[in-house]
Amino acid sequence: MIMTESEGEQFFIKFYIIHRTAVDHPHHALFCIFALANAKRDSELLRKSTASKSRLTKGGHGNQSENEGRIEAAKTLINQLKKERSISGLVNNMETLCDAYIQLANYNVSQFRNETKPINLDKRLWIMQLKETENIAVPTDNFPIDPSGDYKSIVTLKGFEPTFKLAGGINLPKILTCLGSDGRKRRQLVKGKDDLRQDAIMQQVFEMLNTLLHKNPGTKKRNLSVRQYKVIPLSQCSGVLEWCEGTLPIGMYLIGEKDEASGAHKRFRPQDITARACRDKMVETARKPLKDKLKNFLEICSKFQPVMRYFFMENFSQPSVWFERRLAYTKSVSTTSIVGYILGLGDRHIQNILIDTNTAELVHIDLGIAFEQGRILPTPETVPFRLTRDVIDGMGVSGVEGTFRRCCEKTMEVMHNHQEALLTILEVLLYDPLNNWTISPQKAAALQGRRDRMDTETSELNVTMDIDNANTSAKDSQESVNKLAERVLLRLQQKLQGYEEGVQLSVTGQVNNLIQEARDPKNLCKLFPGWQPYI
């Protein structure tokens, strides 16, 4: 790529800044640089017939020569950092660790698909052969940036346990346990064939939002925040995530496993119809007119009553603790609802929302559907956030009134007051050629379980797509992607200014409108049955 003199000068300034940052704060910066340098590392490591599958990912939609230039620049930077005496050992060790993670992410474990017990790691895997890791910080740990650059007291990586477990999902991500220098064990989720870069960026957005919420007196007093977890992309299609300890999906609590026997609905409302029966009834009217869908949905709701209140009774027996946790839950629902609405987060089904069994706060995972892309799924999402009967039931007799509504308004007020800061960071995300936030037809179909229309190879990849096809179409569609980004930014700006359907509303009016939309049976009955809007 040929650069003008001005572009070349800008490049060297940026290169110097990143180089200096990596030298002074290696534990924060190096994984970001390796993720870019190792963008295509999965296929390089596999070198088998399956390598072509491992290259299937959401892929960047930008100019490919520009992307290749960034990858080469990252590799050059790493080579230079290896010559820095103060961090050369750390860079080499971290490079080995990244390769070990990527190899494990792509390790074929299909033969263990139904295994629930710990599985022994193959001794030939590089993750089992790591020796020099004690100068690397535990990747999924969060620790503040020290202006002095002194990180001698951080918790470092001692090694890994020789077994792993499998998490649910088509791609079978691995649950790995790492050992820290402080003696604590930490679980990590190692994912392959999935692009985690958008999840990582969303966590950065959450961090900025939490800073804004902490600075505002009204939201700080109410202790409003969005729960975060660490996401570390390793390449275009693999990465490591912090395991959210002490949490479980709200779906696991409410309806349990396949037989539903352990779910709260079955235990506390045995006379109701099952969640499976509810889903089947929704499928029956999925292609029928709205009048039939609505009638069917209301009938389902009358035979399937909410039970989320029992979560607090079962987990917090002391009245004062019960009250505090229910309040914390209500605040968490309000904050994540408004933030989710602003960012256009979709795919908020009951397995993608976790609840902390100690604090009762919600943790939203799998953030790949954002900027209202859920509206273009085969069955469009018609609600701004999840505010179903069970979610409301956990708030107590006040429901959406009182604490929930006030906290929604306070959070929205902060969003409105800092729209310039929000738009700036989101604009960078939307126009970044290395990040693809748009939904491919394959991903849309996989998300809503329509794999029967897809060939075997594609369905095995769950939320992935053929990068070669993506790159080909990217050359022809970059202009249309930029136009789409412009529309998304315009819609974000409208939300942050209170515009709903062309009418500018006050914060109170906007929040009221969103609550009504999220609860409206006419909207809920149109949703994909797998979203389970009756729960």
Image: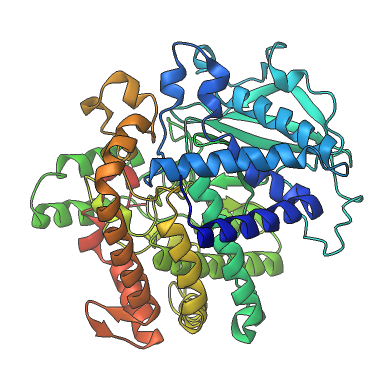
Compared to 425, does 381 lie above or below? above
What percent of the width, then of the height, locates residue 356? 62, 53
Of 7 and 415, nearer the camera is 7
Q: Decide if residue 340 is in sight here.
A: yes
Q: Decide if residue 243 is in sight here.
A: no
What percent of the width, then of the height, locates residue 423? 45, 71
- With 127 as the anchor, is 148 left or right in this view? right
**Figure colour scheme:** rainbow
Of 366 and 533, nearer the camera is 366
What percent of the width, then of the height, locates residue 453? 21, 27
Of 259 and 44, nearer the camera is 44
- With 318 as the anchor, is 528 left or right in this view? left
Locate residue 71: give its quadrant.
top right
The outermost residue toward the front is 5
**Residue at 30%, 73% in the rendered image:** 516
- With 42 as the anchor, is 386 left or right in this view? left
Compared to 171, does 46 lie above or below? above
Compared to 175, does 393 lie above or below? below
